[in-house]
Amino acid sequence: MSINTHLQFLQTIGSKKPKTINNQVASCPFCQVDQLENILVEKGSIILLKNKFPTLKDTFQTVLIETDDCQSEFSLYPKEHLYRLMDFAVSQWLQMSKSGEYQSVLLFKNHGPLSGGTIRHPHMQIVGLKYVDYRENIKENDFVGVEIASKRSVEFNISSEPRMGFYEYNVNLTNLEDLSIMADYIQMAAHYILNHNRFKCESYNLFFYQLHNRISCKIIPRYATTPLFIGYSIPQVSNDLDGTVERIKDIYHI
Ligand SMILES: [Zn+2]
């Protein structure tokens, strides 16, 4: 096994992790702020802390609690909170990258039962990888697509060559000063997925990437993954990208 291609999942820690995503009764660990341990940085209701259940070998796993409102959601935040959160998340992520301690650093978010997440409370994760560089699995074409909107240095599109399928939204930014525009487009994509998607969808992921001269975010609606992708790594793309672009433009007046 190569340490540069696979992360090792630590099974004994994984089996102790609490799950609240499908069980409303279990008490939420992120609501009990006075019980939180190993807090790294705090800004109002936004808290970055060490992950209590670090399941991945050779990584530094952190959790970024987005708000003190357990039932809220990224797509619902008032703009002021959205911008504060994105500014916090991206600056902590870039800072960890610049530390030089990691081969690469992930910033991502799981929402909903099919997203791979275990805790319902809105949160993201920043994970430093000691030996793995995620960029080796990334292609430039992963981020190209049919444009939905653009403003200043930010482009919002729908992938014409999705990594997995069928719909993947990308937000590409080249100037960090435009981070709030990026935040607006990401929030729009998340809101569209949860409320206006052609097929009912309760789950999505956000994935952030640091590339040569820009930052990109992928917003991916999640369903049961297609067998063609699982078995053969063949991605699929919808033949109605243009229709989806028009729908989003209509709904959000962009
Ligand atoms: Zn909670």
Image (spheres, helix red, strand yellow):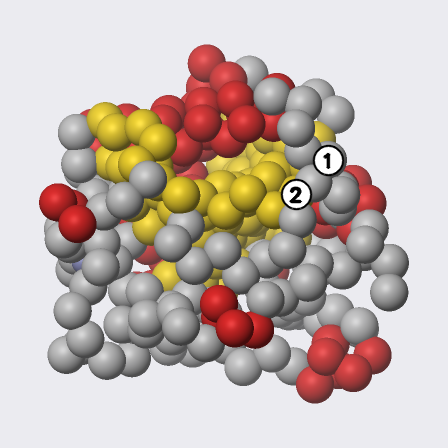
Query: Is the shortest distance between ligand 1 and the CB of mark 1 under 8 Å?
Result: no
Q: Say which residue appears at 55% left-offset and 16% top-offset.
A: 175
Closest to the observer, 173 or 29 = 29
* Residue 85 position by quadrant: top left
Using residue 31 as the reference point, say whether residue 199 is left or right of it. Answer: right
**Residue 241 location (% of width, % of height):** 60, 60
Asked if the residues shown at circle 1 and circle 2 are in contact, with their CB atoms under 8 angstroms apart, the answer is yes
Q: Quadrant of ligand 1?
A: bottom left
Find disc 1 in the rendering and name its residue. Answer: 103
Write down the residue under mark 2. 129
Answer yes or no: disc 2 within 8 Å of ligand 1: no
Q: Quadrant of the N terminus?
A: bottom right
Residue 40 location in percent, x, y? 35, 31
Q: Is residue 36 above or below residue 232?
A: above
Query: Which quadrant of the figure has residue 226?
Result: bottom right
Disc 1 residue type (three-letter): Gln
Cα distance between the residues tagged 1 and 2: 6 Å
